[in-house]
Image: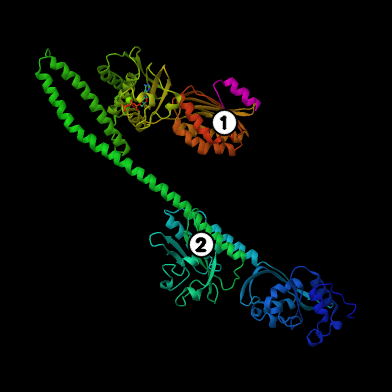
Amino acid sequence: MTKQLSYGQSLMAGKILSHNWSDTPVGDITQWPPNLHTAVSIMLEAKIPMYIAWGNSFTQFYNDAYRPILGVKMEPEPLGKSTFETWDEIWPVIGPMFKQVLDGETFGFPGFNLFLERKGYLEEAYFDFSYSPIRNEDGSVGGVFLSCIETTDRVLNERRMETLANLAGHVVDSKEDVLLVHHQKLAANSKDIPFSFLYLFDKESNTYKLHSHFGIGNTDLIPQELSCLNEEKLEELISKKSMVVKTTDFFAQVPTFINKSWEEDPHQMCLFPLSLAGSRKPDLIIIYGISPRLLLDESYTRFHTLCGNYLLNSYSMQKTLDNERMRIGYMQELLTQKDEFISVASHELKTPLTSLKAYMQVLERSLDPQNKASQFIQKASLQFNKLQGLISDLLDVSKINAGKLVYNFSEFNFADVVNESWDVVALISDKHAILIERNDPAVIKGDKFRLEQVMTNFLTNAIKYSDGSKPIIIRSEVEQDNIVVSVQDFGIGIALENIARLFDRFYRVDNTSMQYQGLGLGLYIASSIIKAHNGSFWVESEPGKGSTFSFLLPINGTREFRDIETDNQTYYIGNFITIRYNAEKHWMEADWQGYQNLESVQKGCMILLDLMKKNNCSKVLNDNSYVKGNWSEASDWGSEFWFPAMQDSGLKEFAWIYSPSTFSRLAAHKSVDIFFDRIKTQFFTSKDEAIEWLSNT
Ligand code: ATP
Ligand code: MG
């Protein structure tokens, strides 16, 4: 019978055939039930670990692939022994299940945790198990058939990946905090890192100082400085990249380990040097406790390295950020100091100036008008007024920056503002003809004094930057519930590239700053005042031909963007936009009209997005031909929010017909800035060309 038996060529096949089975509960091999032969034969030919426990004594058979699971238990070969002899440490867990299998039950466990003594210590190991009955020919259960795949690597890797993933995404205030937060997060994985210390290099003392730690109860035992690392040892650590130390060599006394996962104390630890680019010495040294139930193998070390590198990288990034913050904070401090200085200085200057003015007035009145000195006093008065203007501008700017400019709102007719500011500038300019071409009456609520200041700023600029041979024209008209005011000159004009920055504080176009007096504050102050009135401002200008500075104020204090009609599917008509689905061309058409602001742009854009989705379009004809003024406040929203949403909803081509307003064009370009590559966008001055382009793309 033995001769006819063949179990293949494996090591265990040979061992089973030559084993003396007569001394075991299964008895002589020639007398085995046929189903045991079949099961053993299947097991021996299999490439995954398989195991049979036969009979009530659970006599064990296993294949070659199972042998690594036995580890040190293989000496002497435990073939033919009982399961509970070999696996005595886990018998309390598996014994009851084996017995149930003999009663006909089947078990399957993924990722089952067992502690095996196969490497000379209790080792944390995981298996996907299946226990099933092997039946005799009469249907009774003869034994347990076990097949399993060891999943220790997978389970440990997943656990370590989770720890690494948890390290990500923490916003903190400083590079020291980043280390603390991330280091403490490692404590959650006490199976891989039962304890840890982080040491930071301290330049002053030239030592590594304890920064954070976890896992040790009697913390006074943790050295505050890594004095065990002399220069020689440090060099060794740097060259080896890690170093294993016994805990008994590190601590003066045996420490208490807290948050332990196992009964045994960790008895080893591993040191890792972490260096930022360009550092001569490691910037950090991290020490990890090693689990007493794991082998410090390559993947364990790789995990330590990854954790360390993560800490180092976040430390490095935060360091850069901290430096940048400090630089900005410093700069801001300087700016605040400057503003405070300007504020105090201009205040201090005001008092003596007021007295001086009073003395000059007394002097002027006491002199005979025929007296020559009287003319000088008049000239001095003129210069004096300029000086007073400069000082009050400086004071205004410091108030605006500190958010302390107070507005006194009242109701008045805006036409009075136009007339009164004309009176003021006509006094100072005898060369220019200043014409009020239109001055619609409109009662508004606002700060009359401050709005007059805006008008005089625009007018004094027009006077300053034109030669007087041509007039200066003021228009103030009511349009769409707004007052739109413009001051036009035919002077030096401004190049396109300088227009966007005009309203910045202290900004002056380079070539004008030398020739004309001024601080570059007028437009900045004017724009702050207009914004405080919910208005907007813009410029049209051409070098050599002149400039038109305009601003808009909503008569009711706020602007209203009303719906007129919509079917919520193919069209929308509002008092600021008309949106239509062009079924023939299968695209959306948006027609913007008049003055827009953030609110109108957002409202119109969201309706356009909705209708585009409903009609499944990928093209938009965006007509700004009738857009006036400036809507630059909405351009950031357009690029950060709306264009991405349009792209997500399928937008591919966007034909943009320009507004005649330069500011509106600048806003258009800014809002597509980063989307230019992703959505095919083209700007046009003619609607026909836009339609042609969109039809052919
Ligand atoms: P300040 O108003 O503080 O006395 P400023 O006139 O130089 O000085 P702003 O009124 O803020 O400052 O104007 C900023 C810059 O804009 C000016 O320096 C000038 O270069 C340009 N600018 C303003 N108005 C005109 C204009 N009407 N024509 C041409 N350039 C102008
Ligand atoms: Mg000015």
- Label 1's element? loop
Residue at figure coordinates x 25%, y 17% from the top left: 427
Query: Residue tagged by mark 1?
Result: 567
Q: Is residue 69 above or below residue 310?
A: below
- Label 2's element? strand
Looking at the magenta stretch, what is its main secondary structure?
A: helix
Q: Residue 679 in the image: state x and y as whole percent.
A: 59, 34
Q: Residue 275 in the image: state x and y as whole percent.
A: 50, 57
Tell me if I can see residue 48 in this picture.
yes
Amino acid type, callout 1: Asp
Which sits in the foreground, 628 or 149?
149
Outermost residue toward the bottom?
A: 23
Locate residue 28 relative to residue 621 in the image: left or right.
Answer: right
Q: Residue 371 in the image: state x and y as whole percent.
A: 11, 14
Q: Quadrant of residue 2?
A: bottom right
Residue 65 painted magenta: no
Query: Residue tagged by mark 2?
Result: 273
Question: Sequence order check: which comes first, mark 1 or mark 2?
Answer: 2
Amino acid type, callout 2: Pro
Q: Quadrant of residue 389?
A: top left
Q: Residue 413 in the image: state x and y as whole percent.
A: 30, 23
Locate residue 156 relative to residue 286 in the image: left or right.
Answer: right
Locate residue 676 relative to residue 418 in the image: left or right.
Answer: right
Which class describes the residues within 10 Å of circle 1: few (<14), some (14-19), or many (20+)?
Answer: few
